[in-house]
Structure formats: structure tokens, C-alpha cells
């Protein structure tokens, strides 16, 4: 097994912001966000196990295995305390990291996170997991985004190349199956509500009202302690669709560490 791929940007020291992408993506999902973050902030962008540069890393499969592997990777990099943000599946992984290591996570930002409820567009995610051609990948990404948002050609070409790597489609299939412990027809695995509500660090949630992958919940569905930011008319791919809105929430979360 190779190691976890982590990309370091921004400041050379200080408490970092760790960014986790969603299913079928890689750290490049955060590119539009990273360029707008303060240069004084240390940023670590992680490729989830089974994705991108972490294709063969330990921790492939479900969110729990990924959380454990990412904590180990941060340990190996000498990162003790950190701010944490995750999109989609990366949101579920981030939540599990916060539950496992609450004293290390200074703030938690969940962007259209997985694991909050069983409802999920399993069919779209399965098509995305199996997509290899430019047309298939573009169709899936555009379906995941709000009407009127067209996925940039460079992003589509990036994922065409990524999917061509030996073992990538098999890794995505493995991860897809782990998302549905009782089968896709029963929805995704759900994080324990009591453990989410017990988190002591500040937690912010961002969600688009037109999310076609994970339906935007009503506020009572989330712990009352979570600060819930609803973005009207936006879809699931918020780091790409609305980087400015995501950056505003992240800058507030990291506070004086930026």
C-alpha cells in the first residue's frame, strides 16, 4: 500500500485547515476555494483513500476506515490540532474524525455532507462511479450541479484521465458498496445523531436547496448546535458552484488561525 496523498499550501506553519473532497473526486475539487482562502492560512488538501493520489492507500472502503487512515496520516505529518472541512462523503468522514478525535478538531465545516439521513441518489452515484468517458462524466457532474452550472472542460478531462488509472474504477465500486451497508435501496449509512449533537467544537453546515444527490434537510433534522447555511438555488457541487460562499464560512470557522 502507498501512503495517503496530502497537498500542503498557504502558510508554512500554524493550525491548518484540512479539506476532504467527496466520492469519486480528489483534492482538486477544492481548487476554486483554495485560491480565495487567506494566504496566511495553512491548508492541507487530502485525497481520500481509494481516490486520486491515495488510490492504493490504507483505508479504502467506507467512511470509518477513511477517517482512521486520515487521522493516522495527519499524525505522521506531525499535525496535532486542525480545522476540518468535508464535502459530501468527505463530510461524513470529517464528522467521524471529529467524533474520534474531538480534542484535535478546532472547528468542523460540513458541505452537503453524507451520513446525515438515509436519503441519497444512489443511482446517480453508481453511474458516476462507473463513468469513464467524457460524455458520461460530464453528464453526471452536471446532474449533481444546479441548473445552469456547466462543469468546466478541464475538470471533465481531469477525471477522464483519473478514471483511466488501473484500479480506479474497482476502488470506486468498493467505496460505493461500503456506502450502503443494507443495499442501495435502503439508502446510505447514517451517522449517530447523539454523537453529532455531542460535538463540542463549532460546527457549520452548508447546503444547496437544489441538491440532487443529498436532499437539503429542514433545520430540525440537524443538531440545534450546528450553524446551518442554506444556499438557495444551488446544487451538490458547492466547492465548484459557490466557492465564495464556502470560503466565507471557512474563514469564519478558522478565525484567528487565518
Image (cartoon, helix red, strand yellow):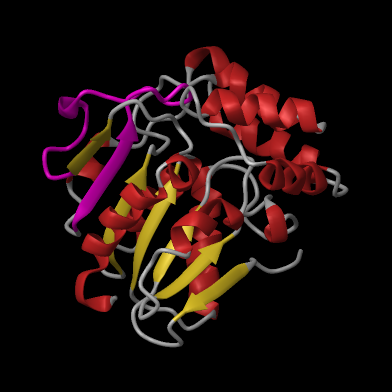
Residue at 40 percent of width and 34 percent of height: 115
Query: In the displayed structure, does residue 21 sit left or right of residue 224?
Result: right
Pinpoint residue 6: horizontal percent, then vertical percent: 59, 69
Quadrant (top left/top right/bottom left/bottom right) for the C terminus: bottom left
Query: In the displayed structure, does residue 126 sit left or right of residue 225?
Result: right
The residue segment tinted magenta is 202-226
Taking the view exactly as shown, the residue that stands out farthest to the front is 148
Residue at 49 percent of width and 45 percent of height: 240
Residue at 69 percent of width and 30 percent of height: 138
Residue at 53 percent of width and 80 percent of height: 77
Query: In the displayed structure, does residue 232 sit left or right of residue 181?
Result: left
Q: Nearer the viewer, residue 30 or 23?
A: 30
Pinpoint residue 62: horizontal percent, then vertical percent: 56, 42
Pinpoint residue 247: horizontal percent, then vertical percent: 34, 56
Decide if residue 49 is in sight here. yes
The quarter of the picture where residue 39 lies is: bottom left
Decide if residue 183 is in sight here. no
Query: In the displayed structure, does residue 168 sit left or right of residue 25?
Result: right
- Residue 216 within the segment the image draws in magenta: yes
Principal secondary structure, stretch drawn in magenta: loop
Query: Is residue 235 shown above or below 66?
Result: above
Query: Is residue 206 shown above or below 251?
Result: above
Pinpoint residue 213: horizontal percent, then vertical percent: 48, 25
- Residue 219 within the segment the image draws in magenta: yes
Amino acid at each position: 500500500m502507498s501512503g495517503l496523498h496530502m497537498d500542503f499550501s498557504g502558510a508554512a506553519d500554524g493550525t491548518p485547515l484540512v479539506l476532504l473532497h467527496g466520492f469519486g473526486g480528489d483534492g482538486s475539487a477544492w481548487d476554486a476555494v483554495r485560491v480565495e482562502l487567506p494566504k496566511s492560512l495553512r491548508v492541507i488538501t487530502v485525497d481520500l483513500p481509494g481516490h486520486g493520489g491515495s488510490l492504493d492507500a490504507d483505508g479504502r472502503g467506507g467512511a470509518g476506515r477513511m477517517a482512521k487512515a486520515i487521522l493516522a496520516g495527519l499524525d505522521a505529518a506531525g499535525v496535532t490540532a486542525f480545522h476540518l472541512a468535508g464535502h459530501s462523503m468527505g463530510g461524513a468522514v470529517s464528522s467521524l474524525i471529529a467524533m474520534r478525535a474531538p480534542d484535535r478538531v478546532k472547528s468542523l465545516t460540513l458541505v452537503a455532507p453524507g451520513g446525515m439521513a438515509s436519503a441519497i441518489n444512489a443511482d446517480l452515484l453508481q453511474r458516476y462511479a462507473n463513468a469513464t468517458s467524457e460524455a458520461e462524466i460530464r453528464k453526471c457532474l452536471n446532474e449533481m450541479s444546479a441548473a445552469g452550472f456547466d462543469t468546466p472542460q478541464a475538470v471533465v478531462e481531469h477525471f477522464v484521465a483519473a478514471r483511466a488509472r488501473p484500479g480506479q474504477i474497482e476502488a470506486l465500486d468498493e467505496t460505493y458498496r461500503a456506502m450502503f451497508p443494507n443495499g442501495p435501496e435502503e439508502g446510505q449509512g447514517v451517522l449517530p445523531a447523539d454523537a453529532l449533537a455531542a460535538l463540542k467544537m463549532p460546527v457549520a453546515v452548508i447546503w444547496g436547496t437544489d441538491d440532487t444527490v443529498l436532499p437539503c434537510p429542514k433545520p430540525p433534522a440537524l443538531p440545534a448546535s450546528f450553524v446551518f447555511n442554506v444556499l438557495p438555488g444551488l446544487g451538490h457541487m458547492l466547492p465548484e458552484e459557490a466557492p465564495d460562499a464556502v470560503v466565507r464560512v471557512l474563514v469564519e470557522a478558522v478565525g484567528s488561525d487565518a
